Amino acid sequence: MKRGSKPGKEEEEKQDYYVNMGYAIRTLREEFLDIFYRELIFLYLQMKAIFDRVIMQRNTVAAKFEMKYS
């Protein structure tokens, strides 16, 4: 964009997006300090990944068994 020229609608929307994103991030940091300063615990996600892996292995074994003995 040239200096002194009026920005287009798309450029204005882009600038508004970045301004609003900045306000949102600042508000989150002020209101929810623990999210940004405490170490997050991902135990739930780890347990879900392990559970999903066990179920997938169990289904694979069951499918092989069915193919072998059917």
Image (cartoon, rainbow, N blue to C red):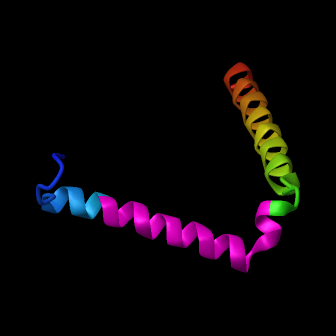
Say which quarter of the image contains residue 17. bottom left
Q: Which of 70 and 31 is in front in this view?
A: 31
Q: In this view, does 14 lie above or below 46?
A: below
Q: Picture coordinates of residue 69 (x, y %)?
A: 74, 23
Magenta span main SS: helix
In the image, residue 32 lies in the stretch drawn in magenta: yes
Task: In the displayed orientation, state which residue is furthest to the bottom.
Answer: 31
Q: Nearer the viewer, residue 53 or 10?
A: 10
Q: Picture coordinates of residue 39 (x, y %)?
A: 88, 56
Q: In the visual, does 47 lie left or right of 1?
A: right
Task: In the displayed orientation, state which residue is furthest to the front.
Answer: 4
Start-end of magenta stretch: 15-36
Q: Which of 57 and 31 is in front in this view?
A: 31
How many numbered markers are drawn?
Answer: 0
Say which quarter of the image contains residue 24. bottom right
Q: Picture coordinates of residue 15 (x, y %)?
A: 32, 60
Identify which residue is drawn at 79% across, 51% down: 45
Q: Which of 23 and 7 is in front in this view?
A: 7
Q: Picture coordinates of residue 6 (x, y %)?
A: 12, 60
